[in-house]
Every structure is written in structure tokens, then in C-alpha cells.
Image (cartoon, helix red, strand yellow):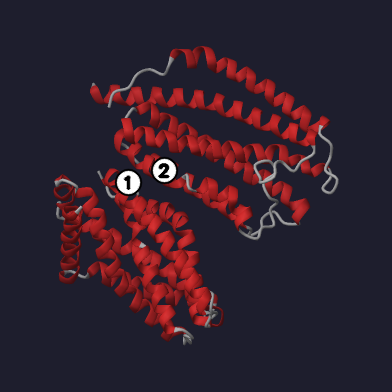
Amino acid sequence: MTTTAFPHVLSVRIRPLLGLASVATALIATAMALIWAPPDAVQGQVQRVMYVHVPSAWTAYLAFIVVFLASVGWLWTKRPAFDAIAVASAEIGVLFTALALVAGSIWAKPTWGVWWTWEPRLITTAVMFVMYVGYLLLRSLSSDLEGRATRAAVIGIVAVVNVPIVHLSVTWMDALHQLPSVLRPGGPALDDRMLATLIAGVVAFTVLYAWLMVARTALERARQERVLRARDA
Amino acid sequence: MVSGLRRIGLIAGRELRADARHPDGAVAAMTFMAALVLLESLIVGPQVARDTLVAPALYWIALLFAAIVVTTRSFDRELEDDALDGVLAMPGGADALYGGKLVSLAATLGLVAVVGGVVEMALLDLAVALPGHLALAVVIGTAALPAVVVLDVALTVRLRARAVLVPILALPVLLPQLVAATNAVAAALAGDAVASLAWSGLLVAIALVYATLGLTIAGTAIE
């Protein structure tokens, strides 16, 4: 396995810009969520948790789709950059899935009366979370670079099936969880200001994902370099 | 295609002969399953365990863990005899190994499923309204189990932490399969023929998806 340094332009120029963009979009999205967006007619102020919960779930979906694509890329080309992208995206995906679960739980308590309920969206999300924790465990318990990347890629390909299952679980089964707010047949079912705020949140979380991805991928590439140098010495 | 199927047949035959000569894996799985059914029933209490939905759930959870035991033992035997590298060195060896293990383990698990089922029915004094539907659901559910378990055991075969990793990797993937199998058997116990067949049909669909996925990526995973 050969590797090359992480692209200089990404680590030196784009990374700080992404950091600035992430802070700026987060500030704008926070202001919109707390001040500009109206409270929900039924749920009141607590509905504002949606502006963290939905973007977290969207970012987790995105992260796991990137894991799938990078896993296919690794199996296809055996280029270590794909493995670095896969592990970076999996870690960030697990982080955002946990955030979506915690935010959802905080939202559920005042609206449903419980922190957790055995409901299709919650169960499928928890299963997805466990599966990607298993992915990270598999990686952490393997020592050889190529074998670890190949084993992880197989799980990364299999586990992506969770993403459509989680998203569509509320339409397939009788669910307490509300239907998708934006990606639903017939278009978004939200007030215009709520929709704009939600989109701002999704943009902010996506930029944050990109920033974390560049940083974590660079770290993984440096780690790969170090391991290969030690092996060649 | 024909030579691929022939190789799978050769591996499956070799596995079944090895199981017949040294049935330690199958015996361990049967004992494990019987112990698990007994303990699960004791923990929740026989009244709860006898429920038409609880009894099948206990059965499939026990059979799943028995499948992990018997599959792990099967791969351990390959490692002990240094046979794994020899099989993988053959052209199409990894695919043949996966397919062969799938066939042979389904057969071995069938035996474990029958023994475990008889033990559970005797212990819990279960009444079966539709024996034919019950047999169909158990056959399909048992044949469907190895696809994911073999893949996960193959992925972790050379790792020391395999005992921890296999259940963590397999259980979430097998969740839809366990739900379908439990409901198919529960409906057969309760006498709902249409529901039993519908859940068995879903089980077939899930099994086909997993087996196809397994056959597609097993070569890469095992190598």
C-alpha cells in the first residue's frame, strides 16, 4: 500500500476557510432558530429543538452515504485516501446520530411525555447507531492497515441500507414520530420562516461536517503515513 | 457457473463430512440452545414464556446465538488445520468457501433448530395450531440465518476480539429477519395462516437480499 500526503490546498487553505464558514453559518442559523423563526402553534418554544435535531439527522445520513462511497472506492482502487475518508465520515456520522438521538429525546419529553418510546424511527435510528459503532469497533480491533480497511469497507457497504430504512420508517409503519418535514410527497409541510430556518440549520451542519471531515481525514492520512514509514523502516 | 456451483458443493460436502466425524460444533450449539431456552424461560417465568409471541422470540434469539457458536467453530476448525489458506488459494476459493459454509451450516443448524424446538415445546407445553406453517417458517428462518453470520465470522476470523465483534456486527443486521421469523412462528402457533405465510414470504425476501449481498462481497471480505 502506498500513500501520498493529504492535499496541501485542503489542509492549508480550505480548512481555515471552512472553519470560518462553519462559525458564520452556525451563528446565522442559531439567530434564525432562536429569534426569527416563529414558535410552533401547538408545541410552542420547544419545537425549536427541531433546528438541531433535523440537521443532525441529515448530516448523519450524509456521513454514512460518504462512508459507503468511500468503502466502494477503497475496494475498487485500494487507495488509502478512501479508507481515511471512510473512517473520518463514520466517526462524524456516529457523533451526529448521537446528537440527533439526544436532541430527539429532549424534544420527546415535553411533547410525547417520555424520553424514549418503542417507535419505528427511534428504533431504526438506534439500530443504525449500534451498527456504525460496530464499524468503528471493528476498525479499532484490527491492526493491519489493508485488512482493516477491507473489513471495514464491507461493513460500510452493508450498513448504508439503514439510511433509507430510517428515513422511510415513518411512512412504512404506524409511527408516533411525525412524517418527514421537507423530503416528503407533496413538498415541505412547514411555515416559510420555519423552512428557511431549517434550511439554514442544514447548511450550517453540512459546512461543519465538511470542516470536520477535512481535519479528521488529514489526521488519518498522517497516521497512515506514520504506520507505513514504521513498517518500511 | 457450473464449476462455481461444483466448488460450493465440494466445500459443503467436506464440511458436512467433518461435522459427521467430529460433531463438536453441532453438539455445542444444541446444548447452548437448550440451555438458553431453559434459562430465558426461567428468567421471564413460564407463564410469560408460553405467550405465543414471547416463545418464538426466545426460540429465535437462542437459535441465532447457536448459529454464531456453530459458525465460529466451523471457521476455528479451518484455522486449526491450516485449511483456510489452502481453500482461499484455489481459484474462486473465497466465494466457494462462503457458499459451501452457507449450505453446510444451514443443514447443521436445521438439526439444532429441530432439537431446540422440541426442547422448547416440551418445556413450555406449547400448543401448535398450524404445524405445517410452523415447519415452513422454521425451515425458512433457519436457512436464512447463516448468510449474515458467516459473513461476519469470516470478516473477523483472524481477529482476537472476534467473540465480541460477531454479535455486535450481526445482531443489528439480523433484526428484520428475527422480527419476521418470530411473527411467522407466532402466527402459526396462534392459528393465523395468512399472517404466517405473509411473514414467511417477507423472511424469504430478506434472506434472498442477504444471501445475494453476501455472495457478492464475501470474496473480498474473506480474502
Would residue A120 appear left or right of A147 to someone viewing this image? right
Would residue B92 appear left or right of A159 to someone viewing this image? left
Residue at label 1? B217
- The label number, if any, that marks residue A230 in the structure image: none
Marked residue chain, label 1: B
Marked residue chain, label 2: A
Q: Relative to B3, say whether B23 is above or below.
A: below
Would residue A185 appear left or right of A67 to someone viewing this image? right
Residue B17 rendering spot, x and y as whole percentages: 15, 67
Q: Residue at x 81, y 34 (%)?
A: A37
Hey, which quadrant is residue A198 in on the image? top right
Residue A66 rendering spot, x and y as whole percentages: 48, 34
For the residue carrying disc 1, how many other residues have a C-alpha within 10 Å: few (<14), some (14-19), or many (20+)? some
Work out which quarter of the rendered image holds the N terminus of chain A and state it: top left
Q: Is residue B156 at all visible to an observer of this figure?
A: no
Q: Relative to B6, say whether B62 is above or below.
A: below
Residue at label 2? A157
Q: Is residue B184 at all visible to an observer of this figure?
A: yes
Question: Distance from label 1 to label 2 (Cα)?
Answer: 9 Å
